[in-house]
Every structure is written in C-alpha cells, then in structure tokens.
Amino acid sequence: MDVLAPFAAALLSLRLAALVVRRYRAHRDAELLAWAASLAAFAAASAALAWGAAAGWDDRSFRVYYLFGGLLTAALLGSGSLLRAGARWAAPVALVYVGLAVGIALAVPIDPPVGGDAIPNASTHLDVFPARALALVGNVAGTVAAVGIALAGIRRRPVGNALIVAGVVVAAAGSALAGLGQGGGAFFTAAAASLLYGGFVSRR
C-alpha cells in the first residue's frame, strides 16, 4: 500500500496536469499553465514518495521530494491564482523562484545523509537557510495568495473557488499528518489534486 498509493496519486496528478495543459492550449490563459505546473509538482512529489517506499529513502529521493513537495507545489499554485487575478508580474517572479528552488534543491548539503523507510523530516537533514527558509516563504506566500484570491472571488465563482480552498486545506492537512506514512500522505495528495483540478476548470 505504501508503494501503490503514492504511485497512483502520481499518475492521477499527472493526468490532471495534462488535462489543464489541454485547456491552456485551447484558451491560452496563463494561470492554467501555472496551475498545471503545480499539479505536475504534486505528481513528482508523489513519485518520490513511491520511490522512497519501494527502495528506501536516500539523498536523491529526498531532494526530489523536497523540491517538488516542499518548494514548488504551493508557490506555483499561488502564482496561478495571482495570474487569474490579473497580476502579470507573477509569471516572471515565479520563473525566478523556480530556478532558485531547483538550484538550492540540487546543491544544498544534506547532513546527516537520508536513510530508512519513513518520510524524512527536513529539519533533521537541512539547515534553516537557504532550503527551509525558501520553503517557508514559498509555501506561506503561495497559500496566502491562493486562499486569499479564492475567498475574495467566492461570490463570483462560488464552486470553483470553494474547491480551491478545500484543496489547499486538504494538502496542508496531509503535510501536517506526515506520520501517516507514504500511503496516507498519498491519499491526501490525490484528494487535494482532485479538488484543485475541479477548482481550476470550474466556471461556476
């Protein structure tokens, strides 16, 4: 279960990302591209969970998991919400952030080395600066942007914005309940990705 559940969550999230990309090709709305990237980050983080469950955690699987799950998912979600609200500056800022996140995730020292079967705790293996500090900034800013913009527009688009808020809440709950292991975390990821997808494509 600890392998199959995150693998299924990765496939589901990747499929949903592809559907959002298809809508982007049809409508050319920039926020759809950012949201598709967020769902793809969900998929990559879930794939890292499956990798860790199947082969045991090491520095490589942890770097993938931290990059996509810890650094990118919420930030890309928030950038999509800002773009939906008309903040065109969010696109270049998001590109700079993604580049910075990738560089840090690849280069930051991991000490002590990651091992074992449980999902690694970032505070055990990474210094506060720069990796954990950047994750805090990206997650807080992305979450505030996504939830704030959804709540501000909930009268105009009640169903879609309510689904986005619900997806953020479920994703946050999954992160808070890391003790559930790879399988439990994957269920939260799949549920969050599904709710967010519904919010992205709903016109109500």
Image (spheres, rainbow, N blue to C red):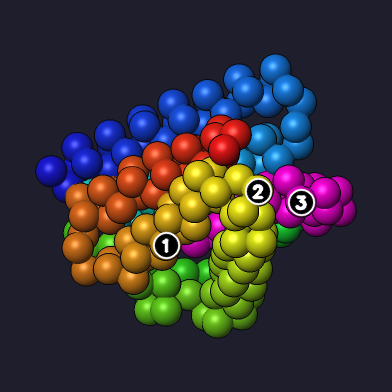
89 is within the stretch colored magenta? yes
| Cα–Cα gap, marks 2 and 3 | 12 Å
Badge 1 is on which residue? 169
Disc 2 residue crowd, few under 14, some 14–19, many 20+, Cα 10 Å: few
Camera sees residue 40: no
The residue sitting at 57% across, 29% down in the picture is 20
State the residue in front, 13 or 88: 88
Magenta region? 68-94
Badge 3 is on which residue? 85
Q: Amino acid at mark 2?
A: Arg
| Mark before the other along the chain sequence, 2 or 3 | 3
Q: Label 3 near label 2: C-beta < 8 Å?
A: no
Tell me, for residue 156, which label it has, or none.
Answer: 2
Q: Residue furthest right?
A: 89
State the residue in front, 187 or 112: 187
104 is within the stretch colored magenta? no
- In the image, taking residue 96 as reference, residue 190 lies left or right, namely left
Q: Which quadrant holds the C terminus?
A: top right
Report helix, strand or loop for mark 2: loop
| Cα–Cα gap, marks 1 and 2 | 21 Å
State the residue in front, 61 or 22: 22
Image position of 67 with respect to 198: above or below: below
